[in-house]
C-alpha cells in the first residue's frame, strides 16, 4: 500500500512538472545546439526531435547539432563553449549535464552524503560561470534540460550507486532556479523518466528505461526524452492530419490537409488527399553503440505517444458493411463501417505510402547522425586529449606524434586512432560536412507533401 501511495505521488509530481513547462517551438531558420555529455553525444533524443520537425513541418527548414562529449561535466562544457558551441553560430542552445558531475562509485562509500553535496557544489560553481557566458549571449535562446536519470531502482543487477540520482536532482534544481531567474526555458527529463521506471518496475522490478549501465538511456528512452521535449513545446494533441468524411454528402472536414474530388459511385468512395505533414516514423532497428532496444519500443510503456503525437486520422460516416482501404493502390486494411466511423489512425500502418515516404526521411536522418558522431569523437580528442597539451585544433605532424604516444597509455585515445587518422585532414572534415549538408538537402526534398489517391472499396 505504501509503495502504491509513493508511486502516486511520483506520478502526480511528474504530470505537474511536464504540464508546467513551456518551451517555444522551433521555427524555420533556427540553428539549435544540443549541449551535453555522453547521453547527448552518443544518444538520439536530438535527432528524434529534428525528425519530428522534418516530418511535421516540412516547409520550415532548420538545423540542429549534437554538441555532446562523452564524460563531460559542467567544467568541461565551460572550457569548450567558444570553440565547440558558439562557433556553430546557434540561435538556440539547450544545456544538460549532471551525470558525470555527481560522481559514481563514491556513493557506495562511507561518506556518500558529504561526497554528493561536494559534487553538487562544484557543479554549481562551474555552472555559474557558464551562466555568465550565456547571459552575455543575448541573441541566443537558452533552454535548460534536467538530465535523464541514473536508474537506482531497477533490480536487473546489483551494481547500483546508491542515491546517486538524488544528487543529480539537486543539480537540476539549480538549473531550474537559473532558468527562472534569467527568463530562460526549462525541460526536466529526470522526474518523468523516474515516474515511468517506478510505474513499470511495480509490474516488473527488472524494467529500466535506461540501459544496462544505468546511465545511458536506450533508443526507446531517447524517444521518450524527445516526446517530453516536444510535449513541452506544445506539440501534444496536434494531428499529422485529420479527415472527417461524410460519404453520403461527399463533404469532408479537414485539419492540416486538403481533401478534394470526393466521389461516391455505387458505394465506391474515392478522393484526393494531400496532408501538410508526414506521420512520425518509429525505427524498429536499434542504432548506436551498445543499444539493444529500438526507438519504436516507446509504445510499450508510452502508448499515448501515437494518440498525442502521431495521429493521422480518417473518419468516415454514412457507410455500411466492410471496406477495403487503399492509398495509391496499396491495400492498407479492411475496416468495418463502425471502425471507419470511430476513426482509423493511418500512422499505425507502416506500409502506407505516406509512412514509407517518412521512412526515407528517417533513414537519411540516421545516416546524418552517424556522420555527425564522427565529429563528436573528434571533439572528444580535441578537448580531452589535445587541449590540455596546448594542441587544440593544431592537427599537424607534431600533434600526430603526441597522439601516437598518448594512445600507448590511454585506451580511450587508442580507440579513436582510425578516426583521427582520417579527421586530422581538413579536407576530410569538410567532405563529411558537405555530405551531411547533402543529406539534409535531400531530406527537405523528400519530405514535401504529396497528393494521395484514397479508395474505400465495399467488400461484396
Image: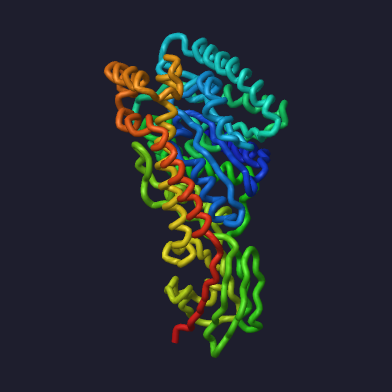
Q: In the shown orientation, is residue 101 left or right of residue 284?
A: right
Q: Is residue 113 above or below residue 272?
A: above
Quarter of the figure with residue 340: bottom right
* Of 267 and 97, the residue lying toward us: 97
Across and down, in percent, residue 220 comes to 44, 44
Q: Is residue 372 visible?
A: yes
Check the picture and name the quadrant holding the C terminus.
bottom left
Q: How is the image coloured?
A: rainbow
Residue 427 appears in which quarter of the rendering?
top left
In this view, the residue in front, 33 or 168, is 33
Q: In the image, what residue occupies the spot 61% across and 22% down? A: 130
Image spot of residue 71 (x, y percent): 44, 24
Left or right of 285: which side holds 22? right
The residue at the point 65 percent across, 75 percent down is: 252
The residue at 51%/65% (across/down) is 346
Where residue 395 sits in the image (x, y, percent)? 40, 25
Residue 341 in sight from this viewpoint: no
- Give the tally of numbered discs: 0
Query: x, y (%) of residue 418?
Result: 30, 32
In front of the other: 383 or 154: 383
Q: Residue furthest left?
A: 408
Q: Is residue 328 above or below residue 401?
A: below
Residue 103 lies, with reference to residue 51, above or below; the image says: above
Determine the residue positioned at 53% across, 18% down: 75
Amino acid at each position: 500500500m505504501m509503495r502504491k501511495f509513493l508511486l502516486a505521488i511520483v506520478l502526480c509530481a511528474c504530470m505537474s512538472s511536464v504540464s508546467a513547462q513551456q518551451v517555444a517551438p522551433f521555427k524555420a531558420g533556427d540553428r539549435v545546439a544540443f549541449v551535453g555529455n555522453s547521453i547527448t553525444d552518443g544518444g538520439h533524443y536530438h535527432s528524434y526531435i529534428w525528425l519530428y520537425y522534418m516530418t511535421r513541418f516540412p516547409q520550415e527548414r532548420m538545423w540542429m547539432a549534437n554538441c555532446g562529449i562523452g564524460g563531460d561535466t559542467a567544467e568541461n562544457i565551460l572550457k569548450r563553449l567558444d570553440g565547440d558551441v558558439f562557433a556553430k553560430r546557434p540561435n538556440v542552445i539547450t544545456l544538460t549535464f549532471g551525470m558525470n558531475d555527481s560522481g559514481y562509485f563514491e556513493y557506495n562509500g562511507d561518506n556518500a552524503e558529504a561526497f554528493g553535496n561536494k559534487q553538487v557544489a562544484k557543479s554549481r560553481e562551474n555552472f555559474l560561470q557558464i551562466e555568465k557566458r550565456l547571459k552575455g549571449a543575448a541573441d541566443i535562446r537558452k533552454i535548460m534540460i534536467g538530465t535523464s536519470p541514473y536508474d537506482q531502482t531497477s533490480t536487473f543487477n546489483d551494481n547500483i550507486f546508491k542515491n546517486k540520482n538524488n544528487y543529480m536532482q539537486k543539480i537540476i534544481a539549480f538549473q531550474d532556479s537559473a532558468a527562472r531567474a534569467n527568463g530562460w526555458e526549462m525541460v526536466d527529463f529526470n522526474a518523468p523518466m523516474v515516474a515511468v521506471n517506478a510505474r513499470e518496475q511495480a509490474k516488473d522490478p527488472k524494467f529500466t528505461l535506461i540501459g544496462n549501465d544505468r546511465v545511458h538511456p536506450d533508443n526507446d528512452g531517447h524517444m521518450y526524452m524527445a516526446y517530453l521535449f516536444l510535449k513541452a513545446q506544445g506539440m501534444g494533441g496536434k494531428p499529422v492530419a485529420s479527415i472527417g468524411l461524410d460519404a453520403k454528402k461527399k463533404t469532408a472536414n479537414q485539419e492540416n490537409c486538403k481533401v478534394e474530388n470526393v466521389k461516391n459511385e455505387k458505394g465506391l468512395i474515392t478522393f484526393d488527399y494531400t496532408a501538410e505533414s508526414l506521420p512520425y516514423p518509429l525505427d524498429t532497428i536499434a542504432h548506436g553503440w551498445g543499444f539493444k532496444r529500438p526507438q519504436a519500443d516507446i509504445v510499450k510503456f508510452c502508448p499515448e505517444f501515437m494518440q498525442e503525437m502521431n495521429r493521422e486520422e480518417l473518419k468516415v460516416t454514412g457507410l455500411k458493411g466492410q471496406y477495403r482501404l487503399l492509398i495509391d493502390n496499396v491495400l492498407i486494411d479492411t475496416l468495418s463501417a463502425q471502425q471507419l466511423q470511430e476513426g482509423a489512425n493511418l500512422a499505425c500502418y507502416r506500409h502506407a505510402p505516406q509512412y514509407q515516404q517518412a521512412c526515407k526521411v528517417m533513414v537519411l536522418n540516421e545516416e546524418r547522425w552517424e556522420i555527425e558522431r564522427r565529429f563528436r569523437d573528434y571533439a572528444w580528442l580535441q578537448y580531452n586529449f589535445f587541449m590540455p597539451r596546448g594542441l587544440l585544433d593544431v592537427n599537424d605532424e607534431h600533434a600526430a606524434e603526441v597522439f601516437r604516444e598518448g594512445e600507448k597509455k590511454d585506451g580511450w585515445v587508442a580507440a579513436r586512432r582510425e578516426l583521427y587518422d582520417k579527421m586530422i585532414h581538413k579536407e576530410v572534415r569538410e567532405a563529411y560536412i558537405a555530405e551531411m549538408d547533402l543529406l539534409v538537402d535531400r531530406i527537405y526534398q523528400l519530405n514535401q507533401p504529396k497528393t494521395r489517391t484514397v479508395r474505400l472499396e465495399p467488400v461484396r
